[in-house]
Image: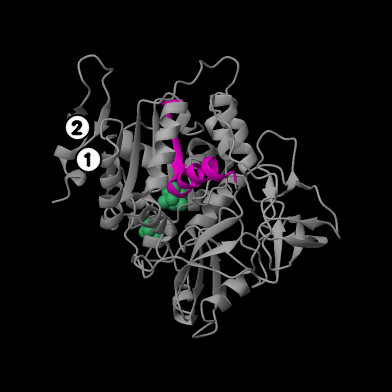
Amino acid sequence: MDPINTAEGMEGEDRSVVSAAPTQPVIELPKRPYRTRGGVHPPHHKNTAKAASEEMPTPARVVISMQQHIGKPCEPLVKAGDTVTVGQKIADSDTFVCSPIHASVSGKVKRIGSLLLPNGTEVQTVEIEADGLQTVCPEIAPPQVETPEELYLAVRESGLVGLGGAGFPVSVKLNFNSNRHEDMPLRKVDTLVINGAECEPYLTADCREMLESPQDVIEGARFLLRMLRLRRVIIGVEANKPEAIALLRMVISARGLEKRICVLKLRAAYPQGAEKILVKACTDRTVPIGKIPADVGCIVMNVTSVGFLARYLRTGMPLVTKRITVDGTAIAQPKNVIVPIGTSVADAADFCGGFREEPRKIVMGGPMMGTALYTMEYPIIKQNNGLVFMGQAEAAAGQPTDCIRCGRCVAACPMYLTPVNIQHLVEQRDKAGIEEINVKGCMECGCCAYVCPAHRPLVQFMRLAKTL
Ligand code: SF4
Ligand code: SF4
């Protein structure tokens, strides 16, 4: 029996391990994950988990989007005709919530263009014709980082954003008191939670990071532990990645870091990797609606982000490539591919042998929370961790019928919401009723829609509810 689903596995049980010597502060590392609510069990389809990542040859051109993070888009620092080198900063912004963008290939800027995002907004792009030489920018050098302030500046310059899909600038996340209201107490963060859950079907890019670069992950974790004066690091990995769990634990043990860093084997259930769910599972702390993990003493970082940070501190090379999982029933050769940022979806598909059937739907990210694309020319961005090419049968959507009030959507919702009621309130345009329900707590994970036997478009209803 799964202990986290039993009464014994719930609150009140002493799970902490007091593992410090008498003269050291007590460090609590959990032995087992804490209970989280709801969730679903879609087929894992982790077809590429065991295949080593392949590096894609430099494409003939890349189109680099100026919107690769949450926040205001960057402005290009280059113009048509300029020569650029790999790692050269080509775009930035003076806004706080922003992350600069770097050239992923060497070559010539062909033009400053524009890109229609799937949400209907338009952003600028820098289109670079590659010269195939991959000349590295001469200014690339490992940064000197001795203080949290220097860490913030270095991480900002690296262009690192949350690589799990969110795209939040990591420098802002590490500067955890920066967005605090004046009347709020200073945030005291003691725990780094590293997200290695990778709960979306198909995606295995983070799994490959843990298998191919476990030393980088632990080195990055150790560095953040020291630099931010944290008490502990908890790496949450779903139970369907036993090799990754074993490998990380081996590295932790070999470095004598067991008292500070642990790997927690999480239940393999979607959306275990959602920030608030992960914090609950790893620390038993609940992030209130409208708050961030730092408000309950945690920073959450994606495992590939932590691995990248270690590499950046060693080499000074900013974020210019990304490992993505290319899979789905329509693709001929599913694989994990390391691509220069700005590579087109079409080029990535070609590298994976093209299609075995015409894709009916192309999803950037995982099938549960990813974004459907409208063109194969769309460029890969920093926070993209997968491309799922769905064939005819896989992409077929059920026809919505009347709600049968079975309550499955309520049971599946990890945020204690009642999607069945919210959809009715939206249909009735009942603004007051919606305001009484915490619909802002909906993270649009899609669990409710996934389990609904009537195929109700519940996520769309949630989005509408937020706009009323
Ligand atoms: S799961 Fe679907 S059918 Fe069941 S109560 Fe929810 S909306 Fe209605
Ligand atoms: S999409 Fe929103 S309402 Fe539906 S299960 Fe996820 S959090 Fe709950």
Horizontal side of 106 relative to 294 (left or right) equals right
* First in residue order: circle 1 vs circle 2: 2
Q: Is the residue under label 2 in contact with that under label 1 (CB below 8 Å)?
A: yes
Q: Secondary structure at mark 1?
A: loop
Q: Horizontal and vertical percent for residue 262?
A: 29, 38
- Residue in the foreground of this view, choosing between 135 and 354: 135
Q: Which residues are magenta?
A: 295-316
Q: Is residue 416 magenta?
A: no
Q: Horizontal and vertical percent for residue 112?
A: 82, 58
Q: Horizontal and vertical percent for residue 34?
A: 26, 38
**Amino acid under label 1?**
Arg
Horizontal side of 268 relative to 461 (left or right) equals left
The prevailing secondary structure element of the residues shown in magenta is: helix
**Amino acid under label 2?**
Arg
In the rendered image, which residue does mark 1 sit on?
32
Q: Write the residue at 51% across / 76% down.
A: 352
Q: How is the image coloured?
A: one colour
